[in-house]
Image (cartoon, helix red, strand yellow):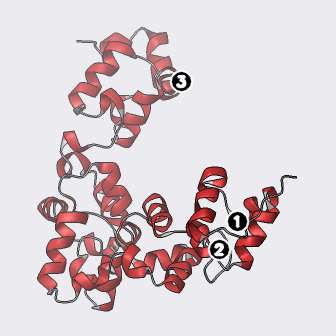
Amino acid sequence: MVYRSYKDWELKDFKDYYLENYKGKGRVEVLKEDCGFYQVVVRRKLLDEVFPEQRRYKGKGKFSYFSLKDFKKYYQENHKEKGRAEVSKEDSGFYTALYNRGLINNILPEDKRWKYLNWTLKDFKNYYKENHKGKMRGEVSKEDPSFYYVTSRRKFLDKVFSVAKYERKSEFSNFSVKDFKNYYKENYDGLFRTEVRRKGFAFFCAVNKRNLLDEVFSEKRTGIRGKFSNFSVKDFKNYYKENYYGMSKGEISQKEQGFYIALRKRNLLDKLITNKNILIFLKREGLLNKVFPKD
């Protein structure tokens, strides 16, 4: 062990020695590597001056030695753009450390809820249309909790989320085709069928039950995946004749499941595909081409 005398050392000497030999290392590391140097620093009460970045603050855990820069970096990496309430709920240890150090105003932006303080009902409606049009309440509450919370507290939920209201099958029982079209345009305009089914299941079921899918939803808005998404009834008929003429539903399902599913979703199975027993009989009697001519 090398003996050193610190008798005549000043604060600058201790700082220089630390920077030359232990720069970036924590107090515990220096204590293990150079116990003599560390003990002298402690006795001279120079810990905070010699180890500025390793000053221990009130509290336990990884935030005890965090500098302002460390806190900012941690916030950007883990809670970027989140408000105080969100950070407090998701990471109480981090929030408590900021509170104990008096750094909340330096690190965390003011709670987003304050920006809604002077908003009118019209402001809430416009914000919803611009940022969350067509989304259900549950989706908005997850994506924009501050907005949803204030809307709830102001008792504007039913007025702001008119699209996301709970639908009941009974309310569509007397709808005409025009009513269905208007309802779709007012509440789900631009959405695909699968999206409407997810967001307004009762409405979708009512349309499907009345066999009005093609009339209410334009061909381009169908939720059927793949090359059949924009098929008309005529296209389906032609495709069936060109590829699977004379085959039963089971055979088509095995050969091309996508086509079969598309027919089923559009309620065209019974209209385009004849029962297999009838086909077998017609084939046996030589009447298939007469009953179902290809052209």
User: How many numbered discs?
Assistant: 3
Quarter-of-image position of residue 3 = bottom right
Residue mark closest to the camera, 1 vs 3 = 1
Q: Relative to 135, is 124 on the left or the right?
A: left
Label 2: few (<14), some (14–19) or many (≥20) C-alpha neighbours in 10 Å = some
Q: Which residue is mark 3?
A: 254
Q: Against 183, is 295 above or below?
A: above
Mark 2: which amino acid? Leu
Which residue lies at the image location 24% right of the left edge and 33% below the top edge?
230
| Mark before the other along the chain sequence, 1 or 2 | 1
Marks 1,2: beta carbons within 8 A? yes
Q: Relative to 13, is 253 on the left or the right?
A: left
Q: Which residue is mark 1?
A: 27
Residue mark closest to the camera, 1 vs 2 = 2
Mark 3: which amino acid? Gln
Quarter-of-image position of residue 138 = bottom left
Secondary element at image label 2: helix
Marks 3,2: beta carbons within 8 A? no
Label 3: few (<14), some (14–19) or many (≥20) C-alpha neighbours in 10 Å = few
